[in-house]
Amino acid sequence: MWKIKQIFDGDYGCEERQPGEPAKVTVYLEDENGNEKAVRAEDDWLIKNNLDEGSIWPE
C-alpha cells in the first residue's frame, strides 16, 4: 500500500505546458516499509479523486 507523502507542482519556468495539455504534478509515494517512488499525475485527476498528502494511492 502506497501513501502520498508529498505533491510537487513543477510547472514553472522553461517547463511550460503545451496548449491544451493538462497540468501535471509529481506525487511522491511511500509504502509501509519506507520504500519511496515518484509518479506523474494530472492535477485535476487528484482533485476529482479527493487525493492529497496523506491519502492512500489507488492501485
Image: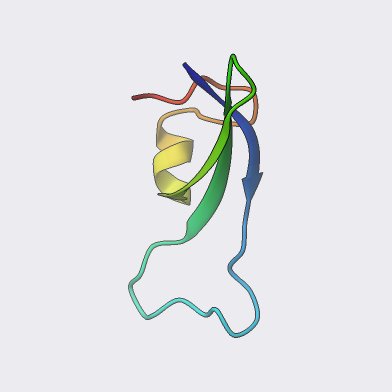
Q: Which color mode does the image show?
A: rainbow
Q: How many marks?
A: 0
Q: Nearer the viewer, residue 9 or 2?
A: 2
Against 45, is 30 above or below?
A: above
**Nearer-the-camera pick, 53 or 47:** 53
Q: Residue at x 58, y 68 (%)?
A: 11
Residue 41 placed where, x, y %? 43, 48
Residue closest to the eye, 4 or 47: 4
| Image height of 59 relative to 27, above or below | above
The residue lying toward the viewer, choosing from 12 and 30, is: 30
**At 46% across and 16% down in the image, what residue appears?**
1
11 lies above or below 13: above
Against 22, residue 29 (above or below) is: above
Q: Residue 4, located in which quarter of the rendered image?
A: top right
Where in the figure is residue 43, as x and y percent of width and height?
48, 49
The image shows residue 34 at horizontal and vertical percentages of 64, 23
Where in the figure is residue 5, as x and y percent of width and height? 65, 32
Residue drawn at x 41%, y 35% is: 48
- The C terminus, quarter of image: top left
